[in-house]
Image: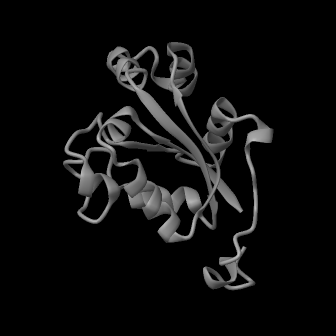
Amino acid sequence: MERTLILLKPDCIQRRLAGKILTRFEDKGFNIVAMKLLRVTPELSKKHYAEHVSKPFYPNLEAFITGGPIVALVLEGLEVIRVVREMLGATSGLKAAAGTIRGDYSSSRQMNLVHASDGPEASAREIALYFRAEEIVASELTLTPWLRADDES
């Protein structure tokens, strides 16, 4: 099973959209294997967004991501990285298609509600930034046989 890191950003939490967005992931059949509420520190922000630290927009990005609580979670499922990114839609809520999370709830490029890892390497790196191994609780859902065929893994 593939895993991805999801961050419900401060705008998502302040707008009380966390439940709606989590429901969409669960409705799709993904399993939440780790989740916590936290504040991103400037140090964690620099690690998470290491490739952007020297860019002119980084100070605003750091101020945003450290500006309020977030919910960090790990989702598990078949092709979860690709599927979640499709569910989110384009980075800018103004360009995201209706029916996507950003298309339905965001009208900003920066305040786009949710972060999702963009590939397997990023996912592994990002999960390790937010969760210790013992905080990830894998379990087989009793409804799994109704979500995918036995030969899909």
Image location (x, y in percent) of residue 49: 50, 26
Q: How is the image coloured?
A: one colour
Image location (x, y in percent) of residue 65: 41, 26
Q: Quadrant of the C terminus?
A: bottom right
Query: 41 and 120: which one is in front?
Result: 41
From where the camera sits, is residue 115 visible?
yes
Q: Is residue 146 above or below residue 92?
A: below
The image quarter in which residue 133 lies: top right
* Residue in the image at 41% along x and 44% along y: 114
Would residue 17 be found to the left or right of residue 103 on screen? right
Q: Residue furthest right?
A: 134
Q: Is residue 77 above or below residue 81?
A: below
* Residue in the image at 27% along x and 44% along y: 92
Q: Is residue 90 above or below residue 132?
A: below
From where the camera sits, is residue 96 visible?
no
Q: Is residue 69 above or below residue 84?
A: above
The image quarter in which residue 147 lies: bottom right
* Residue in the image at 60% along x and 64% along y: 79
* Residue in the image at 62% along x and 44% along y: 123
Image location (x, y in percent) of residue 16: 33, 44
**Total number of numbered discs in the rendering:** 0
Query: 50 and 150: which one is in front?
Result: 150
Image location (x, y in percent) of residue 129: 65, 30
Q: Quadrant of the N terminus?
A: bottom right
